[in-house]
Image (cartoon, rainbow, N blue to C red):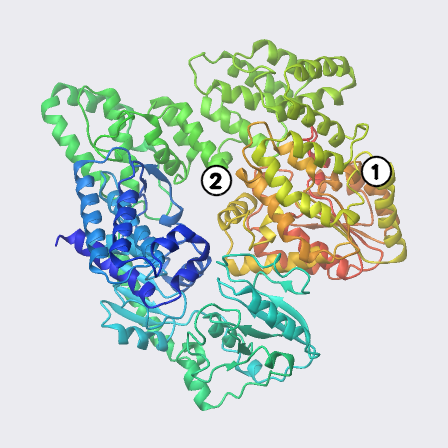
Amino acid sequence: MTLWQSLHHEGLRRVSTVVDGNANYDELLEYRLTDEDRAKYGPSASLESKQQHACTHIARHLLEKRHTVIVPRYSGFVSEGSTPNNDREYQFFEETCAPLGIRVRQQNYSETSTIGMGKRSSAEEAMLETVLEDAQAYYRSRDAISAGLVRQLTLFSVSFFRTAVAFHRKGAVLPGVLVQANDHSPVRVAYSMVMKGLGIPRIYLQHAEVTSLFPPLDFEYSILRNAHSKSIYESLGPASGQVFVLPRYREPFAAEDLGKELVAPVTVAIYPTSRVVVEGLKAVIKSLRSNAGVGKIVIKQHPAAARQLQDVLDGMSVEFAPAIPDERHLALVGNSAVVTELLHLGIPVYQNFTFDPVSPDYYGFVAKGLTQSVTVENLAGEFWRPYRLDAAWRAAFKQLDPSVDTAYETERDQFLAEMQRLRAAVVPAGRGGRMRGSFKARLKAETKRGLIGLINASPAISAPVLDFALSGASKLGNFLTLYSYLGANYLRNRTNIPVKSGRWGADKTPGQSRTDPASALPLVEATLGNLRDPAAWIAENQRLGVFGDDLVIRALENMFQDRRPELGDVFAGFSAWPEGSTVGTWVYLKRAEWGNIALDVAELDRIGVYVHGLGAEKVAKPLLERLLLLALIRNGTTSQLDAFWGRAATTTIETIGTNVRIGLLQKLYDDQRSMAQAVATRQRIEATSSPFELLKLRNMDYLSGRASPGWTHERAEELFGKLAPGGAAREFREIAVPFYDRFRSNMVLMEIRTDRLQVTSALDHIRQCLNEGKPFSFVRLSDGEGYLFPGHPHFSADDSRNRERHWWDTELPRDLSARIIERAQKAIAAADILGIPSVYRFIRDTSDTTRALSQSLQGRGLLQVLAGLPPLLSKDVRLSEDKMNVSLFSDLQTVLDLASNARRAFLVGSVKREHLPAPLSALATLSTVTIPTHARTASNERYIPNTTALPFVYETILGALDDVGPGDLVLVAGGIVGKIMLGHASMRGAVALDIGSVIDDWVSGGQKSLR
């Protein structure tokens, strides 16, 4: 048996161990298995038939024409796996290793880019045959085959093949260490086996309690959660590496809280696992509801829940919490390792297995005497009693929680010493996180000219020498991979010799030439993300011509779409327009658009001369023309727009997107001198518009405050459902319309842009609360607020991380994110008026080419809000569109009038006071509470710099609002965290208003975007 066949076979056995040990495994996979799958491997099928089906299944998946593989570009310590539980373990690992500076969360193979494998090389074909033959032989050797087993083993074999190929391709960067937080799921095992074959040290972080069904430890380093887990693993077989036991908790064990008496009414939090027996859960809730001593019932869903419970439990008077509730409560848990964490936090735990499909007391907590089992009938009475933490209980619990005392600290020090040794043995490429120096510093002009002459004089000698050098460089890691690629590309372009090294991928990839720039796109992105001075690199690259302007711009576009924090470094290098630089012009215009930075009219003329003067062969010209047009719409004059249309080579009114056309029309409508031009332009646009585009124009009229006969939110819903593209209309009918229908009686302010009665009603309500000293809050929920409703299917964890980078230039620790979500939800639940995602927003964001609302991050955010909001809505809340702030507060005089009715006024935002409108900044009663600005306005001098992102300092800032009270007006422009500030102020009796981006309109000037 070859090495790779042996490793594949070992992985098959590891994955099978957990499946074989759980008779209900197919039930755990639930929706991942079809009825056809279950029938093929059901009890009526013969073993021979099951084996044949399994062999056919794996052959079909392995022999498919298209395989994708990751692009291995990380060196040093690298993680793999991106579930919330995985991320929690990686955070623990980083915090423990903080003295050593070891980080793993930013280098995760589960989040890296992938490429198509293309035609397989002979070596890759041999690897595929090895995997396929071994998998089929394994199925033929078994006497039990289930649908769940076939699914998991297929996932493992395909992942093993793809991972092995990825790391054997030329140019692949090998990690120094692989860190994982799962030892038995298929993809995790595939990576582990491949790393084992490559001789890469592996670190295993146990993310949950284990049972005797798990495979033995097979890692160079295993960091277990407790002594109990260690004893289970020891019973399974000898560990192949070093084993450490370290607690996962920051807080000390809250033993005294477990012994406290619970006083009725008791809050009960139910902690289901990822799979739930719904009828059993309903029975539990009904029994608790009949208990006079039970007050609030809260559901804390599992982060990997297979189905969301909000809809199925609708009407049962339960609340949902995104994290473990802070308030004092008792926990009702099924089979879940969360028991250990809850007990550590001092939360008494009682176990009921009615709503759990796994066999009772799977982890043995009840058998050990750590928890008590309660039946559904028990729940109707006073089933809770204070915990008695005698010596036997403490000894048993220490087996699960080593932080019960300080003995673990010695083992932690030993672990750190071992990690220090390992770190010293691993030399990461590009050490220090950012590449130092520039390409210019490495290839001085005179040296290059002399080198090229020497090479061309002796090509026969130079070719093998250079190939050897560049090939060796490719293997050293990210840093040298980037620069070997640069060097190889440069030599190909400037010399007469064929250089083969410094490439990514198999030796031959059909459909892609060796110089295809698309293959260099990930390289350019990685380079731009690892430079101390990207502006200098861009300038030097333009001078040398190593990478084309269009390729660099595409890389920057990708970084922008991913909201890469490094883009801030790029923008920072272009505070002035770099005349003559194509890429620099793109960055400068994008920076202005993104950062809400006004451009001078005269400078726009100069930029226009440059852009229009670019040759027709310039691929980047259409991109620059579009950015210039957007800048002219924001800050230019109508005469400049006329000049643009006369000189643009690739851009016409017919070729720009509908939303850009609408922005252009807005510009013309807002200038009374251009009204005739606006009418003529609209007629030209309407002549070539589709029915849905005509609906967008009508929607524009409403959003601009121009009355449109018969236009109401309900009518707009009807038209959107009829005219929008099929997939978008279907999602709207299935998700948005049921929400609107359910809360139609609350939607009393949905036409506030054009209905003066609705405007008056809202403002009168605010004034009345100011005059009578009553609390009031207006909170807006737009696409970004999808972040506040985890646990629904539309807005993913990746979307949330994208938004964190977008807002704060960093990703938050999960515990901080959970606290922000919980506090913001409380503010939402207490609001008097809520701005919700409206049909107007869906119309604005949809085009004729939209396949589904959920195809965009913004669309997913809007759907997530509508899915997650219902449990938080009170029967008296009034609903408006999420941009009610634009309707009410764009007119500064309205705000000044409200402030005159207030005892005091507070403005919470990131605009510097000296840049506020003079009438507002001059108010004697106004206090400004400054907060760090949004990442997008970080380079705008009108805003407070964000040296520390708002989530890390907001609790300190809240102290500035502690003394607000009845009669005070609090205006907040703080995004997601601002919701917490709104709730904080209204809870103290103040009137709190979510003014949002209106504050940017007050200070920026120029054309306002249509919202």
- Please name which of the two marks, 2 or 1, marks the residue nearer to the observer: 2
Q: Position of residue 880 (x, y in %)?
A: 76, 44
Left or right: 163 in relation to 822: left
Which residue is drawn at the image coordinates 50% and 51% (left, top)? 797
Left or right: 980 in relation to 586: right
Q: Position of residue 857 (x, y in %)?
A: 55, 41
The amino acid type of the residue labelled 2 equals Asp
Which residue is drawn at the image coordinates 56% and 82% (left, top)? 258
Q: Position of residue 185 (x, y in %)?
A: 35, 58
Residue 803, placed above or below residue 635: below
Which quarter of the rendering shows the N terminus? bottom left
Could you say which is closer to the camera, residue 54 or residue 108? Answer: 54
Q: Is residue 938 visible?
A: no
Pointer 2: what residue?
562
Residue 802, placed above or below residue 86: above
Residue 44, placed above or below residue 574: below
Could you say which is closer to the camera, residue 3 or residue 580? Answer: 3
Left or right: 145 in relation to 365: left
Point out the residue furthest to the front here. Answer: 44
Return the disc, 2 or 1, that comes first in the chain's sequence: 2
Which residue is drawn at the image coordinates 19% and 29% (left, top)? 500
> Between marks 2 and 1, how big is the CA–CA gap?
39 Å
Image quarter for residue 774?
Answer: bottom right
Image quarter for residue 733?
Answer: top right
The amino acid type of the residue labelled 1 equals Gln
- Is disc 2 surrounded by few (<14), some (14 to 19) or many (20+) residues within 10 Å? some
Pointer 1: what residue?
893
Q: Secondary structure at mark 2?
A: loop
Could you say which is closer to the camera, residue 744 or residue 678? Answer: 744
Q: Is residue 336 visible?
A: yes
Could you say which is closer to the camera, residue 267 or residue 940? Answer: 267
